[in-house]
Image (cartoon, rainbow, N blue to C red):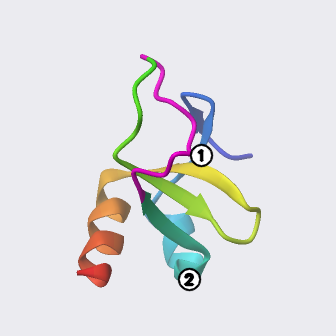
Amino acid sequence: MYKRKGGLRVVDMEAFKNEPGRYEIRTLDPDAPLCPYGNQRIHIGYDKNENSYVRVTKSVLKIILNKTT
């Protein structure tokens, strides 16, 4: 069972390390769900296998962003 937060599945470091190529970060994606306060998210995770948005932990976000810069 996956953890959920704010309606999105949470991808932690363990899940990311099992399949690192599965996830990407989308920046200012107009199709992304809004945050619980109704604002657009700057960065949001995306599961390429399930074609769905996910919430990534801060440590996973840092790793993915460092790979793309």
Between residues 46 and 9, which one lies in front from this camera angle?
46
Crowding at label 2, few (<14), some or many (≥20) Cα neighbours within 10 Å? few
Give the x, y percent position of residue 1: 74, 46
Predominant secondary structure, magenta span: loop
Three-letter amino acid code of the residue under disc 1: Asp
Mark number displayed over residue 31:
1
Q: Which residue is mark 2?
A: 21
Is residue 15 found left or right of 64 in the rendered image? right
Residue at the front extreme, as displayed: 30
Above-or-below relation of 51 to 20? above
Residue at the location (31% across, 52% down)?
58
Q: Residue at x 34, y 61 (%)?
A: 61
Magenta run includes residue 56: no
Residue ID at (54%, 28%): 6
Q: Is residue 66 left or right of residue 14?
A: left
Contact? badges 1 and 2 (CB < 8 Å)? no
Q: Position of residue 59 (x, y in %)?
A: 30, 60
Q: Secondary structure at mark 2?
A: helix
Number of callouts: 2
Q: Is 35 left or right of 69, judged from the image as shown?
A: right
Give percent across and percent down for residue 39: 40, 25
Instruction: Give the spatial CA distance, label 1 vs label 2.
Output: 21 Å
Say what amino acid the circle numbered 2 marks: Gly
Q: Name the secondary structure under disc 1.
A: loop
User: Residue 8 versus residue 69: which sits nearer the camera?
Assistant: 69
* Quadrant in the picture for the C terminus: bottom left
Q: Position of residue 17 (x, y in %)?
A: 49, 77
At horizontal 29% and vertical 70% (from top left) the residue drawn is 65
